[in-house]
Amino acid sequence: MINVRNLHKKFDKTQALDGIDLTINRGSIYGLVGTNGAGKTTLIRHMAGILKPDEGEILFDGEPVLENTALKQKIGLVPDELYFPRGYAIKDMTKIYNGMYDSFDEERLHELTKLFRLDESAQLKGFSKGMKKQAAIALTLASMPDYLLLDEPIDGLDPIIRKLVWKQIVDDVAQREMTVLVSSHNLRDLESICDYVGIIDSGKTVMERDLESIREGINKVQVAFAQKQGNQDDSEVESKAEEALAKLNVLHRDKHGSIELIITRDSAEKIEETLATANPLVLDVLPLSLEEVFIYELGGEKYDFSEIM
């Protein structure tokens, strides 16, 4: 288990981290989501023991990471910005990784480079951005880490390679109970592999939940209410609809023609039961995708939500 508690970090006048709290369970994949500048990369560098926090702590199964060489042997890091020494090939990097990690498995590396179709003898400076990322992932996974920290790992990868990379990571989680934290803007990929998701903004934790509860906790409703019937006037119909909606925890409303789009923090059962009293012509209740949750939780406060949705 990884515990991040009350983490603060300030660079000059910029408060990069402002009390971050995260809990990452053993053998799980945790998706870290946030806008640009939210503090994701700074957090990951702290978790890797590269940066020292101004306040707070990071514990891996109860052990602090800072200046803990034995613990760092168990941590694999694939940063967003990669660096390879000039003139080096994968075979040269193998020697470095072999010296850094006691558990480094050269046979696994050869399997991964073959899977990714990478030439271990070719200089890395001639690799494309995506190929360099694949090389870093192969070297890191071959280190057989207990904890894997990934900062935008699939940036620049084509769809086929993305699937291959995720399969290797998911297999390691299943077979070795590896614990993974992955930061990515590709929320569809995160939604397909993550057990838990944390959303951060301005250096603070906005939300932290298991993926299933995110899907169940907020719903999107598409509804069209009946037109006036008999002696009813428009105000009566509208009043009935408003009375029903007032019983729900409505977070956002937007109307397109006769169809209303409503975001509400209620169960599907409550939504259907409540809105049925207003005799809707159309009523569809859909769970929000991770991308939509992210847009609501952050975009809803900072941007014109109707333009986003």
Image (spheres, rainbow, N blue to C red):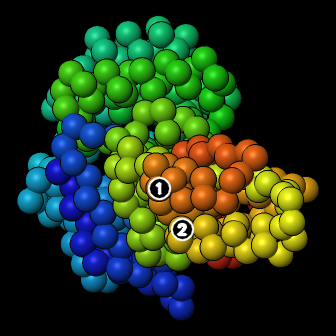
- Left/right of residue 195 with respect to residue 274 in the rendered view: left
To which residue does mark 2 refer? 248
Q: Amino acid at mark 2?
A: Leu
Q: Residue furthest bottom?
A: 13
Q: CA distance from mark 1 to mark 2?
A: 8 Å
To which residue does mark 1 refer? 270
Image location of residue 271, percent across then percent down: 53, 55
Q: Residue at x 60, y 58 (%)?
A: 277
Q: Secondary structure at mark 2?
A: loop
How would you rate the neighbour count of disc 1 (Cα within 10 Å): few for under 14, some for 14-19, many for 20 or more? few
Q: Residue at x 40, y 39 (%)?
A: 194
Q: Residue at x 38, y 21 (%)?
A: 168
Image location of residue 238, percent across then percent down: 78, 70
Which picture quadrant has residue 28? top left
Q: Residue furthest front?
A: 231
Q: Secondary structure at mark 1?
A: helix
Q: Residue furthest left?
A: 62
Give the answer, above or below, for where 262 lies relative to 123.
below
> How many numbered discs?
2
Q: Amino acid at mark 1?
A: Lys
- Left/right of residue 61 with respect to residue 169 in the rendered view: left
Question: Which quarter of the rendering shows the C terminus?
Answer: bottom right
Q: Are marks 1 and 2 in contact (CB under 8 Å)?
A: yes
Give the answer, above or below, for where 57 lies relative to 156.
below
Image location of residue 108, percent across then percent down: 31, 15
Residue 115 visible? The answer is: yes
